Each structure stands twice: as C-alpha cells, then as structure tokens.
Image: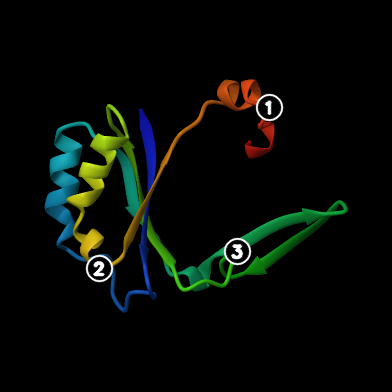
Amino acid sequence: MKFMMFVCTDSEPETGVSDDCGPWVAANDANGRRVLGSPLVSSKEALTVRVRNGELLVTEGPFAATQDVIVGFDILECADSDEAIEVARAHPLAQLGRLELRPFASLEELIARGDSSQS
C-alpha cells in the first residue's frame, strides 16, 4: 500500500532539511519502504496554478496562507496504515513538526465510490 507523507514544520527552516534525516532515509531506502522522497525549496518559490472561466491564473507563493509549511515529502510502501505510522514515527522531524500520511487511491476506486473530482 502506497502512502504520501508530507513533512511539515511550523515555519520555513532557516537552513535545509536536517542531516539527522540521513539515517532514516538510508534505512527506509534499504528496506524498500521509501519509494521516493525529497526536500522542497522554500514555499516563497511556489507557484499556484488555477484556471477560472478559461483564464489561466498563476500566483506566486503557496496555495494557502497557513502556519504549516510543507518542507518535503516521501512516498512510502507499507503493508498498512499501522506500518506507515511506525515509519513516520521514526522520522526525525516527527519530533519537531508534523508528518501527514495519505494513502494513494486508484482512479478506479474513486470512480467506484462516485468521487472522480479528486483526479
């Protein structure tokens, strides 16, 4: 089962993601739980894209003004949500920020539930 794990903090870090993440990344890459992951540049460099009434609207900055800042992400492959929680629990930034886990849904599952608006 695949999970998207958003790595969030209360504010933009003054420096890059902590080197403390190195052992967590290496261990989860080695055991196949971490499929992909990366730190992200500052939310100040984000571009938000919308189309309204056929008009392209591009805004600089994140899509929402919020206290939480997404500073990175990881895609996890876990047996179930309990395993994903244990993987997130061991992440060094779980002590300083928040890790949001969301299971991936297939388009077929969404259509079957009548929720095709998510794609």
Q: Find numbered disc 3 in the image and state the secondary structure of the residue it sits on.
A: loop
Q: In the picture shown, does residue 9 fall above or below 106?
A: below
| Marker disc for residue 114 | 1
Q: Nearer the viewer, mark 3 or mark 1?
A: 1
Does the CB distance between marks 1 and 2 fall below 8 Å? no
Mark with earlier residue (2, 3):
3
Give the residue type that dot 3 points to.
Answer: Phe
Return the residue at label 3.
Answer: 63
- Give me the C-alpha separation between circle 1 and circle 2: 38 Å
Packing grade of label 2 (10 A; few <14, some 14-19, many >=20) is: few
Q: Amino acid at mark 1?
A: Gly
Q: Is residue 8 visible?
A: yes
Closer to the camera: disc 1 or disc 2?
Answer: 1
In what element is the residue under mark 1? loop
Q: Is residue 40 left or right of residue 85?
A: right
The residue located at (43%, 70%) in the rendering is: 42
Q: Is residue 97 left or right of residue 68?
A: left
At mark 2, the secondary structure is: loop
**Structural distance between the alpha carbons of marks 3 and 1:** 26 Å
The N terminus lies in quadrant: top left
- What's the CA distance linking mark 2 and mark 3? 23 Å
Which residue is under mark 2? 96
Q: Would you place residue 79 above or below residue 45 in this image?
A: above
Residue 101: x and y, percent?
38, 46
